[in-house]
Amino acid sequence: MLFLELFCVFFKIGLFGFGGGYAMLSMIQAEVVTSNHWLTSSQFADIVAISQSTPGPIGINSATYSGYISVVNEGYPAIVGILGSLIATVAVVLPSFLLVLLVLKILNHYREHPLTKTIFAALRPTVVGLLLAAVIVLMTKDNFGSVTDTPWQFCVSVFLFLAAFVGTFFYKVHPIRMIILCGLAGFLLYS
Amino acid sequence: MKGNFYLQGFLTFLKIGLFTIGGGYAMIPLIEREVVERRQWLSKEEFLDLMSLSQMLPGVFAVNFSIYIGHRLRGFRGSLALAAGIVVPSFVIILLIAMFFQAFAGNQVVEAIFKGIRPAVVALIAVPCIQLGRVAHITLATAFFPILVAVIIAIAGVSPVYVIIAVAVGAYCYGRFFKEG
């Protein structure tokens, strides 16, 4: 049952994942964390960090990782987890194949059509909203600590968030370097 | 020669998948070098054409792109060979990490490192959000739309899938009944 759900969820993500890897991440988060509770918010943040720092497309990385972790979180052994990651990865790729076979010719014909352009012009700001939603949903106690219970972690987290934002946005620091630096900061400040 | 293509294509895309960090868009220059310059499978124009098509359609960009290139060259089997090349390295590496990571779950040092990384990840998603907003020409006056979308998803808990369908249908109706008159 879990495997069928896993397949359906990632098929849906592959089918409606407009706007590249990050938009897909916000969709994975909505499905896997918010509605199905297969992963915690922290585990999702870990997936994003790992997907960013390893080779390959982020959509594939996160599908493979979520597939494995969500099955193992349900109490299955590691070998079944491999099956979970295989199902999630195949499911996220499958719509692309179907779209090539079924829609490519039609879309190729209509891509300059004003209606097609109107639809894609409307989807672009929607994707911006999707990313904004991911940012809001990830700002949790799990990821930042709490002001009252763990004030030290909260202050460090806010600082690291601002530093990572300023570093990557204004100073164009590479995201992988940023992840490594913040991991180092975590190591020094928390352990 | 034809039998060679599938293996050659698979290995070429395997190499691309293995050596690009940072997502699908980082693969574009590598794919271009291999497919256009080295192997001369496609002209520069065809390459750009397939690229814009891959960006239009939903799904993982790099996978879409390899499917279209493969399909253009050798039909369905070609698309299967190239897409497998892109997916396999990512799949194997992530699976190993996931298994390794799960074994280290609860480790104090690993937990400390990721406690530092998690808030940074949120910032790393905020950056492309703003960049994409610029590309989509969003101003203070039009910012209500992505904000509304974010509220519907993050606070009302509606799945992004339904939001995308609603926007696409809405845009279709708008274009069909208002713009065309």
Image (tube, rainbow, N blue to C red):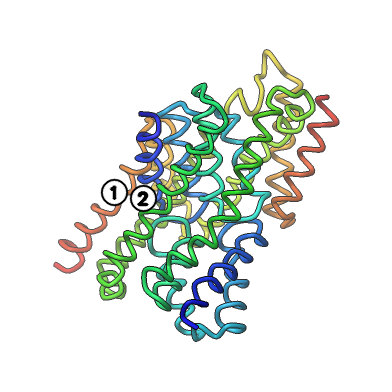
Residue type pointed to by label 2: Phe
Q: Is residue B131 above or below residue A82?
A: below
Q: Horizontal and vertical percent for residue B4?
A: 52, 77
Q: Quadrant of the C terminus of chain A?
A: top right
Residue situated in front as seen by the camera: B32 or B74: B74
Q: Residues within 10 Å of mark 2 (few under 14, many from 20)?
A: many
| Residue A17: assigned label | none
Q: Is residue B154 above or below residue B58?
A: above
A51 lies left or right of B153:
right
Q: Horizontal and vertical percent for residue B140?
A: 48, 51
Q: Is residue A177 above or below residue B154?
A: below
| Residue B165: assigned label | 1
Q: Identify the residue at image location x=60%, y=55%.
A: B89
Q: Identify the residue at image location x=47%, y=84%.
A: B45
The mark closer to the camera, 2 or 1, is: 2
Q: List the single residue furthest toward the top.
A: A149
Residue situated in front as seen by the camera: B2 or B170: B2
Q: CA distance from mark 2 to mark 1?
A: 8 Å
Residue located beneath label 2 in the image: A16
Q: List the single residue furthest toward the right.
A: A188
For disc 2, the chain is: A
Residue type pointed to by label 1: Ile
* Same chain? Circles 2 and 1: no
Q: Residues within 10 Å of mark 1 (few under 14, many from 20)?
A: few
Pointers 2 and 1 in contact (C-beta within 8 Å): yes
Q: Secondary structure at mark 2?
A: helix
Q: Is residue A51 above or below residue B119?
A: below
Q: Horizontal and vertical percent for residue A129?
A: 44, 46
Q: Horizontal and vertical percent for residue A77?
A: 55, 26
